[in-house]
Image (cartoon, coloured by chain):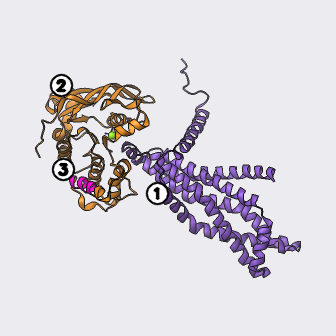
Chain colours: A purple, B orange
Amino acid sequence: MSKKSPYLTTKGIDQLFLGFFHAWKFIAQFFRELFSRPFETKEIIRQCYEVGVRSLPLITLTGFVTGIVFTKQSRPSLQSFGASSWLPSLITIAIIRALAPLVTALICAGKVGSNIGAELGSMKVTEQIDAMEVSAINPFKFLVVTRVLACTLMVPVLAMYSGFVGLMGSFLNVNQNEYTTYQSFIKEAFSSISFLDIYSSLFKAIVFGFTVGIVSCYQGYNAGNGTQGVGRAANSAVVISMFLVFIEEIVIVQVINWMR
Amino acid sequence: MKKVTGTIDYHKKVITIRNLYKSFGELVVLAGIDIDLYKGENLVVLGRSGTGKSVLIKIISGLLKPDRGDVFVLDKQVDRLQEKELRELRLKLGFLFQHSALYDSMSVRENLEFPLTRNVKNLTTAQINEAVEEVLDAVGLLDKINQMPAELSGGQRKRIGIARTLILKPDIMLYDEPTSGLDPITSIEINDLINEVQAKYRTSSIIITHDLTCAKATGDRIAMLLDGQFRKIGTFDEVFDTQDERIKAFYDYNFTE
Ligand SMILES: Nc1ncnc2c1ncn2[C@@H]1O[C@H](COP(=O)(O)OP(=O)(O)OP(=O)(O)O)[C@@H](O)[C@H]1O
Ligand SMILES: [Mg+2]
């Protein structure tokens, strides 16, 4: 006697689509609650501060090092064409268009994403989220909307900051080797990039920030049971955020290149 | 402390459950629950681990949806409520979680203020402080006001959990294993606290436990959960005056060691 399979296709494929459906509902709920009162202004500010301050040291360091290293590594190939005076504009294009938003997003995915995943995950498994719900507080609004908003707002800010720090690192190196002055470095740097570059970079950073926030919150909010669930939530928050950030980077770059 | 009874209104039901079913996948947890909770009454739900006691009060508070059956709380059908109505109903429900579920990023004071300031608008700082101190005093932990939950013992966490639900002055309290994992003396203190709450705030309560001392001390009626149904409901003595081996085993295990 054959038992009827409870799955439409196979277990794996069914679960994949169920997963998409859940994630989609989660995103829809975010936008629904984003525009409904009351706004958790105080908590949003607190989360912005958390996101910003928590990743600031690491972003300063990586931004700066990226600027220096990238300059150092590009110099020989430009020199062989006798074109080392192009160094500032090359570096600026690379940093502003690609490196700053990407590096910032990846660092935030690691630092902020794991934090949100673990925090919400442990709140979930210790029933703190249920406790909010039964005391007539909307946990989605208080926990998820605030964190996703904070990431969406702060990642672009951090990306601009990391771009700035990266350019400073690059300037120090160029200044030491080519004796370029600050004024001419800045002039060269900004003549090479357009507003489209800056806008599209900011747009990317906003998308990345939203991605890190919503993915991490989703993982934490839907964590499985026990301490294992918390660990898994933190881990997949980072992995899935990073994976999606890379995919978005590729897609957005394609779209922007068509627009140019 | 002697239990004060006589304030129970047997004409007014605050919770009515009829023919309630709940399963998780293949696992049937609740299979035809019928029970009433009267105004001012302490109803103890007894049952072994994993019989669905927590699931039952999660359904009552709307955290889980029933598969089948009717659940009325204060004359509202819980699983049919709009979000706003559910929120209003929940203000009248207090829920002590099995593991207290204190917000561990907040101090004791913030834990208590949080449900209050979010649900009652335009309170002055003085009013908030007064409310916080009143409930902390009621559970006897005023000196812990600035502690973090991680710095408290299990019993203290339970009591703060009770204080946090009391602060909204609920009509109905749902206690999930208020004495589990506590020493006998702390357990007795918690039992007294539950009775005090009943007398002082005139709440109706469902108390989940497998601690018979607690059941005896706090329960006006006892309901025995077996195989997803209440097999026996009555006073403590009525429930344990039985030939049912499983109910007898429950008693023997608790009182003869
Ligand atoms: N969200 C859930 N998903 C799947 N199964 C669940 C869920 N919640 C509870 N169960 C299952 O339902 C059964 C009853 O769980 P419940 O927590 O109500 O037990 P309990 O009577 O409170 O036990 P204890 O005294 O140990 O707390 C258990 O077998 C549990 O595995
Ligand atoms: Mg339980």
Q: Which residue is mark 2?
A: B243
Q: Residue A173, image x and y in percent?
A: 73, 77
Name the image quarter holding residue B52: top left
Depth check, front residue: A102 or B122:
B122
Q: CA distance from mark 1 to mark 3?
A: 39 Å
Q: Secondary structure at mark 2?
A: loop
Q: CA distance from mark 2 to mark 1?
A: 61 Å
Q: Residue A163, image x and y in percent?
A: 68, 66
Label 3: how many residues lie within 10 Å, few (<14), some (14-19) or many (20+)?
some
Q: Residue A164, image x and y in percent?
A: 67, 69
Label 1: how many residues lie within 10 Å, few (<14), some (14-19) or many (20+)?
few
Say if residue A228 shows up in the picture: no
Residue range (magenta): B130-138
Residue A42 circle label: 1
Tell me which secondary structure the magenta stretch mostly adopts. Answer: helix
Q: Which residue is mark 3?
A: B189
Q: Nearer the viewer, mark 1 or mark 3?
A: 1
Q: Are marks 2 and 3 on the same chain?
A: yes
Name the image quarter holding residue B10: top left
Amino acid at circle 2: Gln
In the image, residue B162 lies in the stretch drawn in magenta: no
